[in-house]
Amino acid sequence: MKLVTVEQMKSIEQEADANGLSYDDMMENAGLGLADFILDMFADEIEPKVLGLVGPGNNGGDTLVALTHLVKEGWKAKAYLVKRKSDELVGRFQEAGGEVVAASKDKEFESLGSALENVDLLLDGVLGTGVKLPLKGDVGDVLAETTAILDELDEVPFVIAVDCPSGIDCDTGEAADECIAADLTVTMAAVKQGLLKLPAFEFVGNLEVVDIGLPDNLPSLRTLQIEVAVADTVAEILPERPLDSHKGTFGAALIAAGSVNYTGAALLSGQAAYRVGAGLVTLAVPAPLHTALAGQLPEATWILLPHEVGVISATAAEVLVKNLEHVTALLIGPGLGTEDKTKEFVQNLLSGESAPKKSSSRIGFLPSEGEKKEEVNGSLPPVVVDADGLKLLAKISDWHKLLPGGSVLTPHPGEMAVLTGLSKEEIQEDRQAIAGKFAKKWGHVVVLKGAFTIVASPDGRTTIIPVASPALARAGTGDVLAGLIVGLRAQGLEAFDAAVAGAWIHAQAGLYAADDLGTSASVLASDVLNSVSDVLSDLT
């Protein structure tokens, strides 16, 4: 799904009209598409009833077209006209057998209340994308009264917002106090950017897009580079799993992670990489962590790294590089800690040099004292960097030049602040632009985590994950995300596709986990991990 500003959508419609697809045609297509969507949703309903709140603009027109089509399919339909005069669309609806009530003649809202008590579906088609807040006069009164009536009903109709919930600023995401909360928003042609901002998103419900017949070759449409991730596109991204597969078919992920203070991070990321389909997962961890972790992930293989007081030491790069031969993707970062010795490990790994070697009695990986710094294999597989790995990168000069091209970085706003020197507030004010700017500057894919995670590619492509949920606001969920991305990368997905698919699956798994538990407050990172298989099942 494409993401647009209000002005971009106007330009697209103007260009379509100039090229032979009239505004009337677009409205007809929008209304019929909406009606078809509704018919599929309510296919098992007996004698369904619908009330449409019909405003004076194009949204009201879309709603009337849909209502007329529903009447022809056997629905009982009523149109409640809000500042809309009788016109051709109203006449068509009445001729088909629909009932019309004018809000101007329903001073006490008795007809509105009676209708809401007896319908299965409410269509909100009062206001569209051109609304200016605050709302004034009759329109605001009707919306406020509708919300008040719905709050009092024992059985509430399903609410669909047509294009957008009435009273939403579709650019800024501001929301009028009178907004009706939708269960589903069916938006036309493309997602308006304000729908994926707060507080507007709280009124959107689920989000679907209806085709209005726009030609694919419209220049104003083709130049749009911002997408909204949806199930269909993610399903297309995922690698096939042929019947004659073996573990090598699905790649080998190596995860350099963990320290004594953050033992679980390595486990969560490793489990996630396996759960998303990687054929082999190897965990490279400080040696003391092995005993605690090995029994919890018997499917993994292990590389025990040199350590100092439980954190990866500078000399570990040489050990890791010797084990890269068959690795198809490398994750660096979960739970590493930010000690200088671990920074040197990351720097040595990326620069292709091991640290000066010193003797040690802790474990047998360290060479004897006095040996000089020597080159190690600088050919790295595709890389994903997360968590403490990002903070360590920020301490290394020209770090972005040392990473293999097309690496994936997965910062939350705090980590992005460390990498960029910007404040978290500056980043959050324009997440989309910031992610895109630095993806291009660094030459790597940036996954800017948070509500409506942004995935930005150096080539200008950007995808937004349309999820904002406190279910993911829990320690360890980022480790799961990093594991999903490296697992997909290991299977051969291009960096941007792996990041988009991983972020979408991760967000959906958070929603699934909250639904299973009945509350987002109780969701643990392991619950998100355990829901990944359910998300994948629904995609296939």
Image: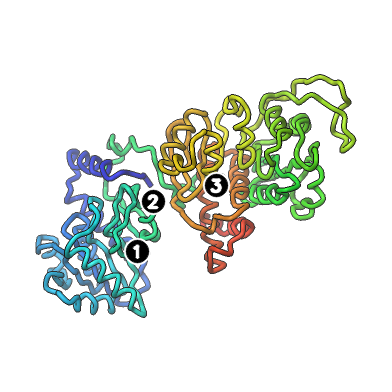
Could you say whether the residue bearing mark 1 is in a helix, strand or loop?
Answer: loop
Q: Which of marks 3 and 1 is in front?
A: 1
Q: Is residue 36 left or right of residue 293?
A: left
Disc nearer the start of the sequence (1/2): 1
User: To which residue does mark 2 refer?
Assistant: 196
Mark 3 falls on what kind of element? helix
**Nearer-N-terminus badge (3/2):** 2
Classify mark 3: residues with Cα within 10 Å, few (<14), some (14-19) or many (20+): many
In primary-sequence order, the first of circles 3 and 1 is 1
Q: Residues within 10 Å of mark 1 (few under 14, many from 20)?
A: many
Q: What's the amino acid at mark 3?
A: Gly
Q: Which residue is drawn at 52% across and 35% down?
A: 445
Q: Where does label 1 land, which residue?
A: 182
Q: Name the residue under label 3.
A: 502
- Real-space Cα distance between discs 1 and 2? 14 Å
Query: Whole-percent x and y of residue 458?
Result: 47, 31
Residue at (61, 41) in percent of width and height: 386
Q: Is residue 397 above or below residue 476?
A: above
Tag 3 and tag 2, C-beta contact below 8 Å: no
